[in-house]
Structure formats: structure tokens, C-alpha cells
Image: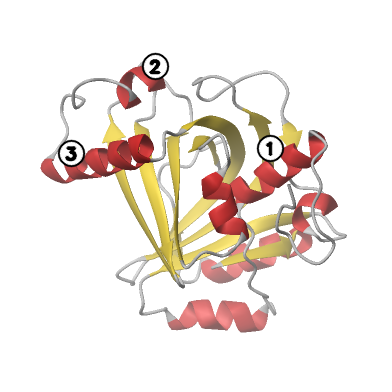
Amino acid sequence: MKYVVDVRLREAIRNFILNFCTRDPHLDPVTGEYTVSTLFFDTWRRDCYLMNETKAVNRFKLRARCYGPPDESPLFLEVKRRIGEVVDKSRAAIAPGWGKVENIVLGSRLPDGLAPSQRVAFSEFERAFRLINARPVLRIRYERESFMGENDAYARVTFDRRIRYQAARDWTLPGSGRWRSMDGAIATGRDYPSFILELKCTADQPAWMAELMERFNLVRTDFCKFATATRLELLHRGFAFSDASENCTF
């Protein structure tokens, strides 16, 4: 569940959830955050993006991701699926020192050291990648503050800020050069500085999450970083969108 939230509420929300959560142990001890760097893949027709824009009931995204410096972080190859209101993610973790992303994705054999479940996840990613003839299209980076529920089977809360993107014309991760901001009013549709709040849980939602939503009057949104970045990049290139919807008219 995603929310675009006024930055002035950030401290109050943090203080509330710390009654039920602990901070992610992987957060930088100085900044209290870590950097998420993601390379997204799509077809030349932007099929994954269009599935999101048209709200296809069954849709997916393909991405490669690292947390923090690439020489210290594993590389995660992920297939993120959405079926109705349920989001499911499978991912294979490649050990630090993974080298070039294209060598792993386009390689002729499985990476070394993968557990059986990781081998399945890698095969799922590779099959989907080859099925749609995907290619790198976007890089997205942001700073994340993360929390984990103390007494829940699975509950996570994340704050994402300084979200930026760049078009990807190669396989480099995390990327360099010029980045375009996605925190502004055009991207979020808000007239105030904001951050992205995400609540993640199983079908059994913790009671404190419901209280959080009610206490801070949170209104759920479908904000998708990948779709928003694609839309901004298409606008930058001169494409047009209809006045009646978010769907691309090209």
C-alpha cells in the first residue's frame, strides 16, 4: 500500500511506528537511510509500462537492484507481479562482486552459489526477460528509511525520498551523470513537498497499520516509480497524453 505524504508528517509517523517496529539493521548509521539503485527492463514498445497504465489485472515488472554501494551489495534480479490487489515478488540474490549486469542476465549458465529457491527465481527472471525480449530502459535511485514490525509475521514500513531517474541506454548499475527529480508536483500530483510511504504485509494486516492510516488520514495511491519515470521521460521526449486519463495516447 503506497501513500504520497507531506514531508511535515514524516517525524510524527516515524515516532508512531517505532512503537511497533524496529529500524532496519542495514541502514547507514550516519544517515539513517540506504540508497536503492534499480535498473528496469522493458520492451521497445514499453509493454510493461503500458500494462501498468491500463491497469491490467495480471502484470509484472523486471528489474535488477542493489542496496548501497554496488561493491558491497548483492545484485537482486526481480520479477514483481501484481494480480488484482495482491503483489508478489520473486528474486535471486547474486553475491557481492557480481561484476557486469549483462554478463549475469545474458550469460549461458546459472551464477555460482545459488540455493535451490534462488535458482528457481533466477530462471523465472531469465524466462520472462527472454519471453518479451526485454532491454534496459530506466534507472531509478532513491534514499530509503526502512522499519520492520517487531511482533508480526511480516510487516515493513519504508520512507522513500530524493527519488530520481535517468534513461538507460546501457546496463550500468547504479549509473552516473544527470538525474531527473521525481519528487516534484508533476510527478506526484501534489502541491507540497512529499515522500513515498509504503506499508507491506501479508493478508493479515497488523492493527497498528490500520491505526496509522486513520490517525494520519492517509489516502492510498497507485504511485509507481517505474511508471512515473517512464511517463516523465516520454513527456520530456515530446510524447502526448490524453486529458481524460494517464494512459499514453501515442
Count residues near mark 1 (Cα–Cα under 10 Å), then give few for <14, some for 14-19, many for 20+: some
The residue under label 2 is 100
The residue under label 3 is 119
Using the image, determine if residue 130 lies above or below residue 104: below
Tell whether label 3 touches label 1 (CB within 8 Å).
Answer: no
Mark 2 or mark 3, earlier in chain: 2
- Residue 159 in view: no
The residue under label 1 is 164
Count residues near mark 2 (Cα–Cα under 10 Å), then give few for <14, some for 14-19, many for 20+: few
**Which SS class for mark 2?**
loop
- Residue 56 in view: yes
Mark 1 or mark 2, earlier in chain: 2
Q: Residue at x 52, y 48 (%)?
A: 48
List x then y, in percent, for residue 213: 60, 78
Using the image, determine if residue 158 lies above or below residue 231: below
Three-letter code for the amino acid on which mark 3 is drawn: Arg
- Please tell me which residue lies in front, 73 or 22: 73
- Please tell me which residue lies in front, 98 or 49: 49
Tag in front: 1 or 3: 3
User: In the shown orientation, is residue 215 left or right of residue 186?
Assistant: left
